[in-house]
Image (tube, helix red, strand yellow):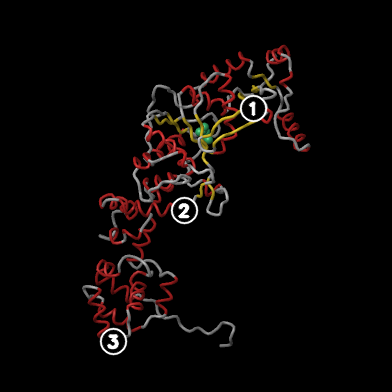
Amino acid sequence: MKLRFAPSPTGALHLGNARTALFNFLVARRAGGTFMIRIEDTDRMRSDPRHEAALLADLAWLGIVWQEGPDCEGPFAPYRQSERQAFYTKTLKQMQDLGCIYPCFCTDEQLADDLEKQKRERLTPRYSGRCAKLSAAESARRLQAGEPAAWRWRIAASGSLDWNDLVYGPQHQELESIGDFVVCRRDGQPVFLLTNLVDDCAMRVTHVLRGADHLSNTGRQLLMAQSLALSPPRYGHLPLLVNPGGVPLSKREGAIGLGSLARAGYLPSALQNYLARLGHAYAENGLLDLDALAQTFDWKAIHRAPAVFDPDQLDHWQHLAVRALDDEAYDRWAGVALGPQAPTGLASLVRDNVRIHTDLIQWRDRLTGQSPPTEEARAVLEALDTRLARYGEVHADSAALTDFLSGLRRDHPSAFPSRKVYPALRAILTGTLEGPELARIWEWMGPERRLQAFQDIPPHPQTTPHPELPP
Ligand code: GLU
């Protein structure tokens, strides 16, 4: 089996594309087959080598490896479409010789007028067939005279096409529903339908999983393959991503780049586990490594319903991924966020409470008294029994939390039950009501930071007169 990922280098690798790449990679890996990257950079205006480099770097970061591609060559090089014009020219010539295509001299204005008319008459928009009716002699004369022409595939007047999509199952298309379609534009540029098919066949790709937006292209590609006696891959289409409300991802949501997630501290294994389950079910709910993800990846288990992109799920996998790091890897990961000046022991103290890099920064600021209390903590502080603050200022040097608490209860019997004193101490020491075990926080902070925290308790709010009342 040979699978591939064929990105257009027009922007960063976003989550939807990363999922497509991963699915193809997992299928190839499970089958012990080949995985290949092909760069579809025929759109010269929008393609950029910098995007290509970033795409490859993001894929490598995700843990994907490829045996063939623009950076490692292989038996079917070149792997960039911009360098494969000769293949397309040859195929176009073959199409002309077989009489499958004809030149179309229609101008943009004519095509736009046709479309308008079809819309008014509530007809399915498709090419009117104007140039299909030109005689061979007339077409040849106009070509000879240098009139610009696109080339269109001539669809038979009747017949139908049936095929089996790996995900969506049996597909059927009446040929009359397909208009004669362009395979080569007026500027000489072959279109995606052609280049993509020609390359998949030439590169012996056997299976393709790609976005459902390409489902409507498949019939035309199979039709061309049939006429040209090519062996096309088997296609499977991946349902679109929607947000938890069921709405297709907005541009902003859909554009979440893998690179920006990596910079935020997301780990490759979190993304692997999350993306592999985006519209694909696994029996196993724990964090799996890439091999295990591949071994049980089954395209028959890909859902046909839209896949819900839920950031909370991504955070769930990230949480597991952080927990699965060994100590050294965790310290390295935390070090990227906290830098060399990080207070000693801080990262391991908050290990169970962090998911991404900003969580580490937030905990550093909380535990070093640099961030204001959360709303809930502020409410607790406002209701604070001032005896606790005073006791704290005197006994902040108690070696362990248990010593501090037993002293407090001795001095103020029954004034400080656990359900009150714990949240109060959390609010005082960290400005939040959640976090690592309080005894560990106590120990890590040491007497000076603790004293500072007791001294820094915001004063009770003054009872200010109501602004609308007279003084
Ligand atoms: N370059 C196309 C895309 O990014 C590839 C489609 C395909 O996988 O066949 O959508």
Name which of mark 3 and mark 2 comes first in the sequence: 2
What residue is rendered at 28% in x and 49% in y? 329
Quadrant showing the N terminus: top left
Amino acid type at mark 2: Pro
Q: Would residue 316 appear left or right of 189 to someone viewing this image?
A: left
Report the residue marked by disc 3: 413
Instruction: Kindly identify the amino acid type of the residue bearing the numbered disc 3.
Output: Pro
Q: Secondary structure at mark 2?
A: helix
Residue sitting farthest toward the bottom: 471
Query: With respect to residue 244, does 40 lie above or below?
Result: above
Q: Earlier in the sequence, mark 3 or mark 1?
A: 1
Label 2 belongs to which residue? 311
**Residue plotted at (38% across, 80% down):** 384
- Which of the two labelled residues, at mark 2 and mark 1, occupies the earlier sequence position? 1
Confirm if mark 1 falls within 8 A of ligand 1: no
Q: Is residue 65 left or right of residue 157?
A: left
How many neighbours does mark 2 have within 10 angstroms: few (below 14), some (14-19), or many (20 or more)?
few
Q: Considering the numbered disc 1 on the image, is that residue within a helix, a strand or a loop? A: strand
Could you tell me if residue 381 is visible in this image? yes
Viewer-nearest of labels 2 and 1?
Answer: 1
The local secondary structure at tag 3 comes to loop
Near-viewer residue (271 or 209):
209
Visible in this render: residue 47? no
Q: Is residue 470 left or right of residue 321?
A: right
| Residue occupying the point 56% across, 82% down | 467
Q: Is residue 408 above or below residue 88?
A: below
Q: In which quarter of the view is residue 391 placed?
A: bottom left
